[in-house]
Image (spheres, coloured by chain):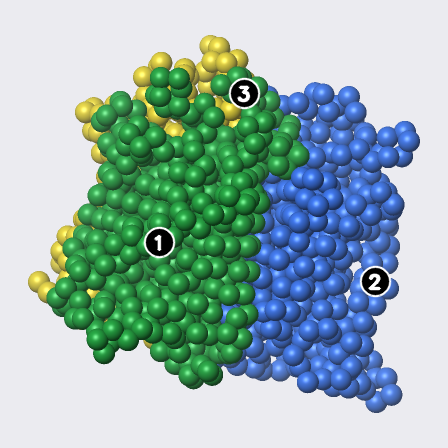
Chain colours: A green, B yellow, C blue
Amino acid sequence: MTPAPAPAMTETAFGVCLVLILLVPWAGAGIALVNAGLGRSRSAAHAMLSSMCVMAVAALVYFAIGFAWQGYAGQPAHAFDIQGKAWSWISSRGFLLSGVEFGLSPVSLTVLLGMFGAGLASIIPLGSGADRWRLGAACASTVILAGWTYPVFAHWIWAGGWLAQLGQNYGLGRGFLDTGGAGTIQAAGGLTALAITWLLGPRRGKYGSGGMPTALPGHHAVFVLLGCFLAWLGWLGLNGSGAILFYGAELGRIALVAVNTTLAAMSAALTAAAITRARFGKTDASLCANGWVAGLVASSAACAFIRPAAAVLIGIVGGALVVYSVEWLELHLRVDDPGGAISVHGLGGIWGLLAVALFAQIPAQGQWLAQLAGIATLLGFILPLSYGLNWLLNRFYRLRVAPEGERQGLDLYELGAGAYPDFMTHNEDLWQR
Amino acid sequence: MTPAPAPAMTETAFGVCLVLILLVPWAGAGIALVNAGLGRSRSAAHAMLSSMCVMAVAALVYFAIGFAWQGYAGQPAHAFDIQGKAWSWISSRGFLLSGVEFGLSPVSLTVLLGMFGAGLASIIPLGSGADRWRLGAACASTVILAGWTYPVFAHWIWAGGWLAQLGQNYGLGRGFLDTGGAGTIQAAGGLTALAITWLLGPRRGKYGSGGMPTALPGHHAVFVLLGCFLAWLGWLGLNGSGAILFYGAELGRIALVAVNTTLAAMSAALTAAAITRARFGKTDASLCANGWVAGLVASSAACAFIRPAAAVLIGIVGGALVVYSVEWLELHLRVDDPGGAISVHGLGGIWGLLAVALFAQIPAQGQWLAQLAGIATLLGFILPLSYGLNWLLNRFYRLRVAPEGERQGLDLYELGAGAYPDFMTHNEDLWQR
Amino acid sequence: MTPAPAPAMTETAFGVCLVLILLVPWAGAGIALVNAGLGRSRSAAHAMLSSMCVMAVAALVYFAIGFAWQGYAGQPAHAFDIQGKAWSWISSRGFLLSGVEFGLSPVSLTVLLGMFGAGLASIIPLGSGADRWRLGAACASTVILAGWTYPVFAHWIWAGGWLAQLGQNYGLGRGFLDTGGAGTIQAAGGLTALAITWLLGPRRGKYGSGGMPTALPGHHAVFVLLGCFLAWLGWLGLNGSGAILFYGAELGRIALVAVNTTLAAMSAALTAAAITRARFGKTDASLCANGWVAGLVASSAACAFIRPAAAVLIGIVGGALVVYSVEWLELHLRVDDPGGAISVHGLGGIWGLLAVALFAQIPAQGQWLAQLAGIATLLGFILPLSYGLNWLLNRFYRLRVAPEGERQGLDLYELGAGAYPDFMTHNEDLWQR
């Protein structure tokens, strides 16, 4: 089952796409910093180290088995035959990147972007599990996400799988469209975050005896907001490289992708600022940061197919959604999500996928149905799969740290040292809660 | 009034320029971090959030109306006819980027760089207004800067406006030259910072009863110095992309631009280190950081036209200027500029513009006059315009926070939460001042 | 002695290589942040400012004289004639970059990469000298490293010097191979760090009366781990640009270089995590960070010539080496190396050079001998040279701060202000030690 010869790219398109992919790790670094800042000071080192380890596990697992499941469009894959139409559901490449020739072909770039994308998706749930998710368990859970859930889903979307084929097979627009991974990376990560939060339960002290949530503010606003800047720069690479690699966008179009990505983040942050100011009398910095990232997330799906004005609208809706969703999850679903990952990446990603149907300038019928099919897959398949596998994992390898660890803080308990040993902190007071 | 077809670029030049532009946001992130670090801990979150919001407002306003005023060389514009020569003063494009085709043309890249440049210019005055400028007022003031002052001035310089035409029309060298925005972005931002500082007045407690200034040191030297590194990386993108986009520099020349940009920053930082060491017996980290950024700023105008040895000289003078200017403004003009934006970006930028006349290797007569015309425009037009419009704004929407807000710190007063809630700080002592 | 006309590159290869080089400063920023975080809070500003100044000195010295010694392959150089074979030992270019034409040639890029590489090498020893190396002395020592040791060694490896010629002259494989500077930058910097540590001696209080080392933990784990992310991004640029510039790698190969670089860092970090967890029961965040960087370092030599599976092995060995080496140096050699630079950059670099002989997919006999010759040169020539010159420097200009300075902290003593004046710290307690 030798892979077919890989398609060629022009040297310039390859070079620009390569460099854009090399900017993608910034997205991971940014989200890591946002998560660390929104958690408590006594688990700050743990938050950063978890991001590092989880990204490392993701890269290794993706290298070992992930890319074998994901593959690349036009390469051999397993497919069902349904009424004479092929439903490609998984790639059939060899493990350990065997058979991959690193030449001027999209395959080399897909390996690289896939590796970084898997790492980014794996960092997302850490925001939700902050202050209570064991490092080892987060790594084990990443094996599931980066080694199975993510690559299979990415095959369906970016490697000629059945979601991408919806257009060709059933005339649903151009098939499911997702330029930079609003669904593939973000919503997949955000829904995994939801599963993890359900399994972990809220932090100790989050819900008082009356059931009312207590505010546990993030410990470092500068890290949170600096992380937003880093994430923006990563997203410019992510959306641009996805557009070239998976949808053959011309270079000229990438300037538009960058404009759209930027405008979506900007309008989302300002929307969150305006809403929190109007509602609470104060502008909430954390929610502005969440809004900013949600704007980036929401821009990912449609950024290569829309006009700038649409990007502004996508951002406004994304920013508003996050503000209300964070509150609603906390108050009504009693979901304790310190980093807001479920709202930002899960809901923001799904909104981004819908926005393709609303705003994409493609002359195609049925794009709505293709996008809805993808969203239904996320909610009806990826979320239960992620919940189920992590539930199983939890049976054998407890996800949540022991109560004593939560009291001490994860830094001391799991790493043996605090993140800020020279600084005096109020942690002692917090321990009383 | 359909725009003329945009000129084409080679795919490679376009790709490299695009990627360089995508590095420009680092300059904004770096300056934001420098500003936050040079302010106090009780307004650190406010400083970062202001940078984020101001950049967002700038991007949206530039998208909505700014680019319409700026335009691109060779595109339709309004021009006076003076003695048979056209003085192009404003572009006549449509709002909301209407008519912009995002293809392999400099126009797409100009939109992107303009959007990031407007954001960078808007972040600069935040350094001067630290610890007392209201978030909402900073956003409103940005509408003026990014929606009017900056794009009109950029039209004059980078879009074939009258300053650029000075060479062709009156034989003044090649017309006003400004590769990466020493005038367009930096001095425009720095002079706006001066206007803002005049309108805001000094921080409470800055000048004691005897009128002597009190040192209010920045709260986080690591952020300040890390911000310098980030800014450097952004400037490599900024100067390189400006050289390609506005002056048609060949790719080979961009390595020289990077060498020059680096050498200017490096020699400026060392000059500031040597001067402060010689004068005070200690090396002043804040002034070294200011010197470093001033070196970057001063390199921006001439970097594409000089030899490396000239870049070293530009840096040395830039670094020295900043050290003395910061002190002089504080002692003699009683200007309270926590981030040093006026000296670093205003004075540094003007020095950079002069340096073109001194060092540029272009066989042209009258370059001096062209550069002086640009500087005169900055001082005689941009500064009064910026002061006047912000004065007007201040009448309707107060720029400065209420005294109570300054006492509490902007974080608590405007955002409802401190940046570092887990850490114990000396803020309580500072409140007594 | 006019230089020969420089060889040409394709525009695309030039552009991609240029942009990759512009990412290299991230490696410096990252290592600076790691070093600052692993030192104490009372010398944090000093650590960052030293990185800035040292990088500045390196750039200026490299510009003034360094590149003249390094040169570029095929350009005029001084050579011994040994048994009819030329042993090129130093370039004979002019000072101050005279004669360098900044065009589409590898020479322009070599200047830029050399300048950044010299800065990176110079930052490495700061990790070892933390908390006691005077700023002025570190700058003076950098003149030696960036103005003489580094460029001469780089000539031997990257500019057609005798180590590179071992293949052609004596049939030792392809001659000494070092894609991204595992030897040229990292081991050279790491061995200089060893020399500096010997000359400085351990920090006050590091070894108690019984001679047992005391743990002096780094003051900021988030900076350390964020620095790792920054370094990773810098290394993607470093290894990629070295592959293109010095070994003519095709663009398609650069995706492989990025995959290999990433996998080495990732597996090294996880190895360090696993070992520390197994041995101490807790995962050590500092050693994970050291492992991560060691993986990057170890990947630098071979990354363009190996398969991804080999990169994983290189990382695993590199990560393990660091954990044991840090402990062994501290316990048995009584070397006080707060940043772990000797183990990470010195040992990691040497392991990377060996790995070329083990894993490189090049059909060549004698590669082992070539690599060993390079390593022998590092240990037998660069280390003594570095030690000797710094010993001499120390006679005239003391490297170590006065005891009072160490007690106060370098920030207060040399800079006149602490890094974190608003925060309450435990420094007072530490002073008792």
The answer to whether residue B95 is left or right of residue A195 is left
Q: Is residue C383 visible?
A: yes
For this orientation, the residue located farthest to the right is: C210
Q: Give coordinates of residue A166: x percent, y percent.
A: 23, 68
Please count the marks in the image.
Answer: 3
Residue type at numbered disc 1: Ile
Q: Is residue A220 among what the camera can see?
A: no
Dots 3 and 2 on the same chain: no
Instruction: Look at 81% across and 56% down and name the residue there.
Output: C386
- Front residue of A433/C29: it is A433
Q: Which residue is mark 2?
A: C379
Instruction: Answer whether labels 3 and 1 touch (C-beta < 8 Å).
Output: no
* Front-most of residues C38 and A101: A101
Estimate how packed mark 2 is, as few (under 14), some (14 to 19) or many (20 or more) residues with alpha carbons within 10 Å.
some
The kind of residue on which mark 3 rests is: Trp
Are tags 1 and 2 found on a single chain? no
Numbered badge on residue C323: none
Three-letter code, disc 2: Leu
User: Nearer the N terminus, badge 3 or badge 1?
Assistant: 1
Chain name for mark 2:
C
As helix, strand or loop, the secondary structure at mark 2 comes to helix
**What residue is shown with label 1?**
A382
- The percent position of residue C149, horizontal first and vertical second, equals 76, 61
Marks 3,2: beta carbons within 8 A: no
Dot 3 and dot 1 within a common chain: yes
Callout 3: SS = helix
Q: Separation of disc 3 and disc 2 at Cα?
A: 52 Å
Where's residue B192, x and y in %?
Answer: 33, 37
Closest to the camera, between mark 1 and mark 2, is 1
Give residue A431's mark: 3
Q: Residues within 10 Å of mark 1 (few under 14, many from 20)?
A: many
